C-alpha cells in the first residue's frame, strides 16, 4: 500500500465523503434513506456556509478512503466535528488518528476553545480514539429514525485552550500527536486518557 495523504477537499469530493459514510453504515448497521438525507442536507449547508470550517479527505494514491470535517457551531467559539470516516478496509492503520489530529490543529488555528461531535453507541474503536484525544461523553439521546433498530446517540466534548494564543494550542496538539506516534504499539492498540497521561508523564 502506498503512503496515505490527507488534504482539504476539492470540488466534487464532499459528496464522496457522504458516499463513504453511507457505504459503511448501510453495510454494517442497515442505515437507509433517512440517514442519507440527513447527511446530504447537512453537507449542502456546509457548502453554502463554509466560513470557519473545512473538510479533509484521506487518499491512497487517488482513491478517497477517509474524511473528516470541522463545521462552525452556533455555540460561541465552538466547532463540531462531522463526517469522520475511514473505509473499513483501511481501519486499524492510524489513519483515523491522523484525520482527527488534522481537524483539531485546524480548530486551534481558528481560535476555537471548544469542540464537540455526535456519534452513537457500539462504535467502540472510535470512542477509544476520542478518549485518547481528551474528549468526554456529555450527553445521550435515543434515535429510532436511521435504521430498524433503536440507537443511542452520544455527544462527546473537548475543551481546548481558553487562551487566545492559538499557537499554544497548536503546539500542544502537535507535541501530543508526535508523542502518541512514538509509542511502540500496533495501530489497533488504543489507550485510555490515564494511560496516555502516564506515557507522556503528565
Image (cartoon, rainbow, N blue to C red):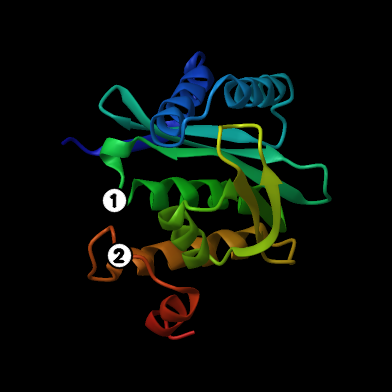
Quickly name the residue at label 2.
189
How would you rate the neighbour count of disc 1 (Cα within 10 Å): few for under 14, some for 14-19, many for 20 or more?
some
Quickly name the residue at label 1.
92
**Residue 61 % position (x, y):** 25, 26
Marks 2 & 1, CB-CB < 8 Å contact: no
Tag 2 secondary structure = loop
Going by the image, does 80 lie left or right of 98? right
Whether 114 is drawn above or below 18: the answer is below
Count of numbered circles in the view: 2
Q: Nearer the viewer, residue 16 or 62?
A: 16
Asked whether the viewer can see residue 159, the reply is no
Tag 1 secondary structure = loop
Q: Residue at x 28, y 58 (%)?
A: 188
Q: Residue at x 52, y 18 (%)?
A: 15
Whether 188 is drawn above or below 30: the answer is below
Residue at the top extreme of this rendering = 12
Amino acid at each position: 500500500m502506498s503512503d496515505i495523504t490527507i488534504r482539504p477537499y476539492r470540488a466534487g469530493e464532499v459528496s464522496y465523503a457522504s458516499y463513504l459514510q453511507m457505504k459503511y453504515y448501510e453495510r454494517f448497521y442497515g442505515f437507509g434513506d433517512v440517514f442519507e438525507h440527513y447527511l446530504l442536507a447537512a453537507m449542502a449547508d456546509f457548502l453554502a456556509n463554509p466560513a470557519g470550517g473545512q473538510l479533509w479527505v484521506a487518499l491512497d494514491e487517488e482513491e478517497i478512503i477517509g474524511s473528516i470535517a470541522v463545521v462552525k457551531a452556533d455555540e460561541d467559539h465552538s466547532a463540531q466535528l462531522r463526517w469522520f470516516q475511514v473505509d473499513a478496509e483501511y481501519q486499524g492503520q492510524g489513519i483515523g488518528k491522523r484525520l482527527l489530529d488534522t481537524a483539531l490543529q485546524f480548530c486551534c488555528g481558528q481560535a476555537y476553545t471548544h469542540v464537540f461531535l455526535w456519534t452513537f453507541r457500539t462504535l467502540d474503536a472510535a470512542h477509544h480514539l476520542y478518549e485518547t484525544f481528551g474528549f468526554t461523553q456529555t450527553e445521550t439521546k435515543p434515535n429510532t429514525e436511521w435504521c430498524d433498530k433503536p440507537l443511542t446517540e452520544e455527544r462527546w466534548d473537548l475543551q481546548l485552550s481558553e487562551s487566545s494564543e492559538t499557537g499554544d494550542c497548536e503546539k500542544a496538539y502537535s507535541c501530543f500527536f508526535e508523542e502518541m506516534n512514538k509509542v511502540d504499539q500496533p495501530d489497533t492498540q488504543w489507550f485510555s486518557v490515564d494511560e496516555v497521561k502516564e506515557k507522556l508523564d503528565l
